[in-house]
Amino acid sequence: MNHCRLLAKSYDRKQYPEHPPDYALLIQHSRDVAAACKALAQVAGSAAMFNAGLDSERLEQFALTLLANGWIQDLGKANSHFQAMVTDQNNIRQLLRHEVISGLLLFQNKELQDWLSPRSEIKLMALWGAMGHHRKFDDNTQANPMLPSLTVHVTHPDFRAILIEMAADLQLALPPEFEQDLVIAPHAREGGDIPAREAIIDLIEEFEDSEFQFKNEADRRFLALVKAYGIAADVAASAVAKREKSAQKYSLSQFVQADLSIGLTPDDITTLINIWAWQSTKLDSKFWDVTKLPPNFLIRDFQNQVAASGSYLTLAEAGCGSGKSLAAYLWAKGWCDRFVGENRHNFRLFFCLPTTGTTTEHFKDYALESGIPASLSHSRSIVDLQTIASTVVEEEAQENASAVEAACQALKAEQDKIEALALWSTPLVVTTADTVLGLMVNARRAIYSCPAIMQSAIVFDEIHAFDDFLFGHLLVFLKNFPQLPVLLMTASLPEERRQALEKIRPDLHCVPGPEALETLSRYLLEYSVTPSSIWEKIQECIENNGKVLWVRNRVDWANEAYDNARDRFPGVSVNVYHSRLRYKDRSRRHRQVIDDFKAVGKSAILIATQVAEMSLDLSADLLITDIAPVPALIQRLGRLNRRATPECPGEPKQALICPLGNPKQDAKPYELKELETAEIWIECLNSLHRPLNQRDLAEKFAELSNPRDFDYAIAENRACFFSGLWRTRPGLTRSEGYTISVILQKDYEKCDEFEYGQPASNWLRKHEVAIPVKDPALKWERVAGIRIAPDDAIYYDYQDETHEGKGAVWR
């Protein structure tokens, strides 16, 4: 083995017939990861320490621990199974994963233990970070007993060279020289071999015994950040080296420094605000002066109050249409000014929304024409990542995955790397909340993005729409990053969630909505309406060229209402909008709906499901809705008479709320108890005997609240980013839903966009469609991790010529 170089990556041997390229060498990759760790600590380490409320004096310890983590990560690749895999490219199964071998070497080998002992204060954290850098190590880790023994090439000159460079970086003595290689066998046997099964059991037991050292919250935060930055360093090192090939052509330090030093200026945000304001005037852009706001453009007191908040955590609770988004950018400018005043010049902003629909619309409205670097799809990157053949498969595949499954997992991992690293050089990111809060469960894209997140101010909009999983992650995030600027926004918030926020963050500063808007009469509420009265009200609205929004709780109900409306109103624009459409079709439908509701003097009917609650920024003249939980009804009402202002109030508009025919049977996707509370809420509102305003909705909801304590302990346990300690596995960002995403078989057969033998990621995104989960779907073939829906199982109703149709249904 000594005549061959130790490899970290596979490479094209036809392109490099004589010598491996630098990026493929284990010694060079180890250097690159270590260099990335140094740069990350230097550029983004102090921000992470500050945000987590950690003593600035720990920055030196953080840098050293992260550096040790980087050097340790891939020592275990110096084993015969891994080297055969990257040489032959035909075997992805190994006795042990390479990062587990790294742990066994550094934690159980006497010579290496003694050598590393001067760094005992950082050893455990560095080792836990290194062993988790592919997010595949926990109590369930085990050896594959069906595979033969492997040899760890500790006598190889490349292995010794890595240890020597590691020693110099960590200021250690020269490493030990090994006289013979180490052999790891599946089971205990005579001859001195290391028994893999018993060694892992011993290792896990020792780790469990060490958990008491991390009872302190600060130490758990410190460890979590070491792990996250170590993972990010590995991703950056692999990407840059693969692109440039030769070590003489790149510098990890320069890459990290350049990308993570990019930021917004106060002028950037001012320009964004001014452009948005000029767009709202409908004037031709040649008349715009984006250095200032349009004449007579008014910034409300509420928006100025949000902007002026000096607390690290602010809650803006205001009704729909009150201008919360503009308030958020004014708030961001205030924090950007503060960063500049503190001599920090890499201010970033993450604007997070609950759904892809709301995210896309916000990006179009605010960021797209702003002229500043902004990201929505995260597909832009100065790093051109390519799949690194079998190495990527080995590193990303789940244990016992087939070759096809492993390749799919690897392809998805590479796409996440591309998108996450793009965020390092993107100072304004409009995204879903999962991109940030996924950090709490070691989600791949979030953890890769951690250095960028730590340099940011963050807006979480529509937080009432977070399920218990996601809201729990929000609480844990806020608790553990007490000095990261965060703005929360919502139209209404259940009392138990408000109390949970106040409990974990006493510094929470609340800003109520603008008085004049909150008390503006908007709604005339009617309950228990009959089907005949519904159609009468629609007819009346249509005759006055009005816009009708009808929200149903289920897709099949929405499709049924859509068919009926088309039959009854053949000359009117009638659309249905829900999640059972391919993304490209849903996107087109979304734009069509928005345009129809903006058209002056033209009637329109939209039947939609819950997706309308946040995804659609439109104003209806008549709202019809199935009864739903109170927060959902408040959101739906926010789409009625949305454009009314104190200056131009108009008349209150009708909202018809329909009871369920059989509540026990028809309650899903909601809980019956939620709907019973909603009925009481409606009664309380109607008892006012007058037109209703947004404040009425929120106050009557608050009066009904009998808040229980939000179970923070459960949330903390789910947030394995902090609670996992030595265990590093991904968890769930949101609770499991009722749908899965699939690709239609007929679409797959027509696919003409491929990358690395799989449908291109952009093609997949355009063609994926959500369907209700049923057992047969779990057995369907997958491509790039997404199930293929057979034609005989799923019918898709959509006409490409007319863009009409009701989407996917089970046959």
Image (tube, rainbow, N blue to C red):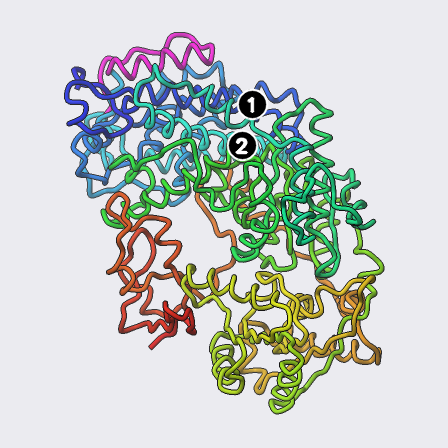
Which stretch appears magenta? 156-182
In the rendered image of this protein, does residue 133 appear above or below residue 656?
Answer: above
Would you place residue 767 above or below residue 216 in this image?
Answer: below
Q: Do the residues labelled 2 and 1 touch (CB within 8 Å)?
A: yes
In the foreground, 684 or 578: 578
Residue denoted by label 2: 451
Observer-nearest residue: 451 or 361?
A: 361
- The N terminus - image quarter: top left
Q: Name the residue furthest top.
A: 174
Is residue 168 within the magenta segment?
Answer: yes
Q: Quadrant of residue 744?
A: bottom left
For this view, does 579 lie left or right of residue 529?
left
Mark found first going from the N terminus, 2 or 1: 1
- Classed neighbour count for the residue bearing mark 1: other residues with Cα under 10 Å, few (<14), some (14–19), many (≥20): some
Element marked by disc 2: helix
Percent x, y for residue 559?
47, 78
Residue 645, quarter of picture: bottom right
What amino acid type should be assigned to the residue bearing mark 1? Val
| Residue pointed to by mark 1 | 43
Query: Separation of disc 2 and disc 1 at Cα?
Result: 9 Å
| Quadrant of the frame with the C terminus | bottom left
Counting from the top left corner in percent of width and height, residue 724 is at 50, 41
Residue 705 coordinates in the image, percent (x, y): 75, 67
Q: Identify the residue shown where x is 36% and y is 42%.
A: 141
Q: What type is the residue that disc 2 sits on?
A: Pro
Which of these two is toward me, 243 or 18? Answer: 243
